[in-house]
Amino acid sequence: MLTHSIDVYPDEVLLTEGISQALELLINLFTEKGDTVFLESPGYRVALSQMRVHGLRIVGIPMSSNGIDLDILEKQLQRLCLNNHRPKFIYTVPTFHNPTGITTSQSHRERLLSLCLKYSVPLIEDSFEEEINYFNRKVLPIKSMDKNQIVFYLGTFSKVLFPGLRTGWIAGEKGVISKLTALKKVSHLSSNTITQGALYEFCHQGYFERFIKKVNQHYSQKMKTAQKLLEKNLNFKGVSWNRPSGGYLFWIKVDLPVELEAQLLQQCEGEGVKVLGGREFFAEKPDALYLRVSVSAAKWMI
């Protein structure tokens, strides 16, 4: 946390089995069936699925080229708060957003935090790829500016080291962390302390920092290669994509009806290209056909 300018005490951190469990605990603590929550649209599909399973009313806030549209967010907050239906939380992925790859600016983060304070709405900051940064200078997490303990930061080692390493954490206000700890004990009797101990030694002996450097060098080359291939093969009218500053993802927009998604995915797979359709990343029907391309697989073709 200190490497990201977040100063927290041990009783303000809870170890979890990855970010998915961290979010599950927060949903269980903050919400009941039928409650309203906000998240980006498109947004992280696993988080979207978790919220749906709990029967929450999901309000998708559209993404702009700079991140979640803060003007629309404020209008939605004003409307709901006037009717006494304040959302239980706002969920955001401000760094290397999944699926769009967008990283928001410092000013965008400051305004988002100020809106949460103004309307007294907790902010869940998912930072699952915080370390995978190889093109631009880092932007500090929203949690680093949080003087009022309204932000709950979710971190993980799974995306950085390897997916099977289910070790993550929540950093937040110690009263809430205490409640989350009790909730975790009820649903999850014991964590994998052997893995946690090995991970501690891995970090303590300096291997983590060295590994991150290698990872960033490796993926920066893959992203550059992927971008060249996209520019070469998809440079025609009706197709556009992002240029992320880190992470693993390209978000491609195709000006075709979303109903053609299944057909296009089948054609892509027939050509040896494995991508995800964008429809499952939206809380509502998308305005066009989208594809999410990841370069983190062992093989990547286009």
Image: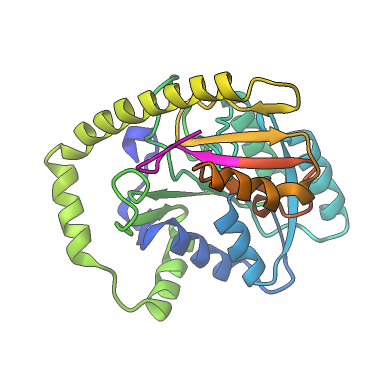
The N terminus: image quadrant: top left
Q: Position of residue 110 (x, y in %)?
A: 61, 31
In the drawing, does residue 150 fall left or right of residue 225?
Answer: right
- Residue drawn at (44%, 27%), measured in percent from left and top? 223
- Residue drawn at (20%, 32%), measured in percent from left and top? 210
- Asked if residue 270 is among those painted magenta in the image, a careful observer would answer no
- Residue drawn at (56%, 37%), measured in percent from left and top? 94
Q: Which residues are magenta?
A: 292-302
- Residue drawn at (51%, 23%), measured in percent from left and top? 229
Q: Position of residue 131 (x, y in %)?
A: 37, 35
Q: Position of residue 248 (x, y in %)?
A: 45, 36
Q: Position of residue 72 (x, y in %)?
A: 80, 39
Q: Is residue 142 visible?
A: yes
Q: Is residue 83 above or below residue 70?
A: below
Of residues 170 and 67, which is closer to you in this image? 67
Q: Is residue 154 above or below residue 194?
A: above
The quarter of the displayed image where residue 81 is located = bottom right
Q: Residue furthest front?
A: 270
Secondary structure predominantly adopted by residues drawn in magenta: loop
- Asked if residue 298 is among those painted magenta in the image, a careful observer would answer yes
In the drawing, does residue 89 fall left or right of residue 189?
Answer: right
In the drawing, does residue 116 fall left or right of residue 77?
Answer: left
| Colour style of the rendered protein structure | rainbow
In the drawing, does residue 25 fall left or right of residue 215?
Answer: right
Of residues 142 and 19, which is closer to you in this image? 19
